Structures are given as structure tokens and as C-alpha cells.
Image: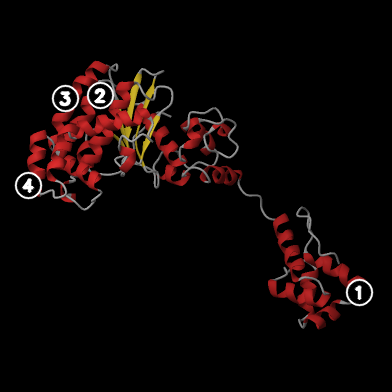
Amino acid sequence: MDPNAIEIRNVPPPGEFIREELEARGWSQRDLAYVLGVPEQTVTMILSGKRGVTADMSRALGDAFDVPAEFFANLQKAHELAHAKQPDPSVKRKGRLQSVYPLREMIKRGWVIDSDEEIERQIVRFFERSSVDDIPHLAYAAKKTHYDQVPPTQVAWVFRVRQIAREVVVPKYSEMSLRAALVRLHALMIAPEETRHVPRLLADCGIRFVIVEGLPGGKIDGVCCWLDEGASPVIGMSLRYDRIDNFWFVLRHEIEHVLRGDGKEVEVIDAELEGENAGTGATLPARERVANAAALDFCVPTEKLESFVARKQPFFSERDLLAFAKIVGVHPGLVAGQIRSRTQNWKLFSKHLAKVRGFVTSAATVDGWGEFAPVSA
């Protein structure tokens, strides 16, 4: 009996190998039953293939024939595997996709439909590709793309933004109108409920504004991209943090990308816009430093904030915060957000970080938090 590797395909039941060994040793079934200490009927059923070899029996047979117990266990496994039912072809397809992208979450969110035959075709269409092998990050992807440096959850989120944005109807984009709208946008920063006017103001400038709830673990804040060969700008936001300071900072950051024409060839994906990533340090790409500077100054005029901090730190009183916010004409939460960032004291003025999601989503194109944005098939 050779306990070497076993061919997986067309493997007979272990009983045939045991029968051959009995013949080689000149043993009868009754002899083997005696050695094993089991009824002869048990041996008969194993030899006929009507009963499989259990782990306990594998050990007993190994001792009886002086071979490793694993030999019989592997015989049984190989036989069962060779005769196992072929799985549905969709299992392999789904496994390949789920290993990279949060397919189950995408189905739950309604981005794709859970259809065994159609799932791969839907994913190809979702990612705007001609074949599944061209989808970013897949193991067999034929081409390298700029998405290789972007986590799959963020890539999927960006494509959902693009998919929804194509359904949004707005007039032709006007840079002049957008620059003029900055004054009106700034006037809305006095109260969280005023954010409900943001989607209409952006639409009037020709910007497709889309809010898509982020995928678990995505840590994405926003994206700037263009449709129609660079003629139609899109701003996507996740509202990862439901805070007035974060909303206005991310929005103004993406608006600056639009004004500069960033993202026409390759989407500008903004993730974890906080800490150093929300600053103007030399380690950041130039376009991010510029966008951050514009966002910071828009939320709270930089020169005035620096003067205020120089005069008041390290002690910032509630009274000073409210008075300064009134002077610069913004909600106290915007000032609080920048002071917290500068001091790294995340407990400071937290009660002023008003929520805005309920207001802005009431007038925007939204996908997430129980809402589904329908798109063309």
C-alpha cells in the first residue's frame, strides 16, 4: 500500500484500496474485523463503499496496516471531492468580485442586482469597462490604472457618484457663475439649516452635486470629476462626518478643484480630509494645498483666525468663540472646527458642531441612509 499523494479525479472509495490490501496480506474481511474490533458488517459496508471512513476508523486502519492514518482520511476526502456536485458557476464569479469589492454591500445598497447570471455583466457596466478583466483591482486585471493606488471601496464609491451624476440635469457649467455663487454660499454658513440651499445654487452654476453614503471602511470625503469630455463638473460628497465645519470645508475644497479644472482627465479623490491632509504642508500635492487653503479661508478668514488665536490661546472661552463667529459671519461650529484642529483638542467646543445632513440631503440627489437614487439600466 503506497501512502503517497492521491489523484483527485475518478477516485474510488477507500474500500477498494482496503480490499487490495487484504488480498495482498491474505486476510479475510472477518480477519480485519477482528483486528479492528468491529462487527464484520462494518467492514463489509466500508469495502462496498456504502459507508465512509471516519476519522476514528482512519486511525484504526492506519494501525492495522502500519501506515499513516492520514492516508485513509485523504482517501475518503479525495473520493468525496471527486464525486461532489459541481458548484454553480456564479460562485466563482461572486467570490472573485467579493474578494476585492464589497459586492454584498453593493447589492444591499441597490447598486447591482443579485442575479447569478447577470452579476458579472452588471459589475462590468457599473465600472464602465468592456470586460471584467479590465475592472480596477481585480486579480486578473489586464491593465494598470490610476485606481491601483485607491482602495477598492473608494473606487466603487466614485463610480456610483459618476453613475448617479449622469442622471442629473443641470444647465451648462459656468465658471463665472460659480465664482459669483461663492458669495451666496458664504451667506449660508450662518446656520445648519441653510445648507438645504446648496444643491440648487450649485445646480444653477452647472455643477452636478451628488451625495452618496460611503461604503464601510471607505474613509472617503469627496470627489471632483467631469463628464461629457470635461464639460460637466461633478462634486460628490459622502458626509462622512455629519458636522457643519466638515461639510463646508469639504464642499469648498471640491469647488476649488472645479474652479481650477482639476479632475478632467483623472478624478480627484479626496479621502481622510482631516489633520495634515486638511492643511497646507509641503508633503501634500500642490492642488491639494491650494484647495485646502481656499477651504480654510472660506470657512474662517485665515488672517482673522490667526489674529484671534494669537490673542486668545491657550485659553478660548465660549464668549470669545461666539463673538468672533459673529464678527466673521459664520456659525460658531466653523470656528470651533478650526480651533480644534489647530490645538488638537478634540473635546473643545464639541457642542457647537451642528449636524447638517438632514438639511442638505432634503434638497440634494442622495444615495444612502435608506434612500436609493434610481439610474438608467
- Foreground label between 1 and 4: 4
SS at mark 2? helix
Query: Few, some or many C-alpha atoms within 10 Å of disc 3 (few <14, some 14-19, many ≥20)?
Result: few
Nearest to the observer: residue 141 or residue 279: 279
Q: Which is more N-terminal, label 2 or label 3?
A: 3
- Which quadrant would residue 296 be assigned to in this image? top left
Q: Position of residue 172 (x, y in %)?
A: 29, 16
SS at mark 4? helix
Which amino acid does the dot numbered 2 rest on?
Answer: Ala
Q: Which is more N-terminal, label 2 or label 1?
A: 1
Q: Which is more N-terminal, label 4 or label 1?
A: 1
Q: Which mark is residue 203?
A: 2
Which amino acid does the dot numbered 3 rest on?
Answer: Val
Q: Is there any visible trace of residue 201 in the rendered image? A: yes
Q: Which residue is mark 3?
A: 183
Q: Which residue is mark 1?
A: 25
Q: Position of residue 8 (x, y in %)?
A: 75, 55
Nearest to the observer: residue 298 or residue 280: 280
- Foreground label between 1 and 2: 2
Question: Vertically, is 68 above or below 157?
Answer: below
SS at mark 1? helix
- The residue lying at 77 percent from left, 72 percent from top is 45
Which amino acid does the dot numbered 1 rest on?
Answer: Arg
Q: Which residue is mark 4?
A: 319
Q: Which is more N-terminal, label 4 or label 2?
A: 2
Q: Position of residue 88 (x, y in %)?
A: 60, 46
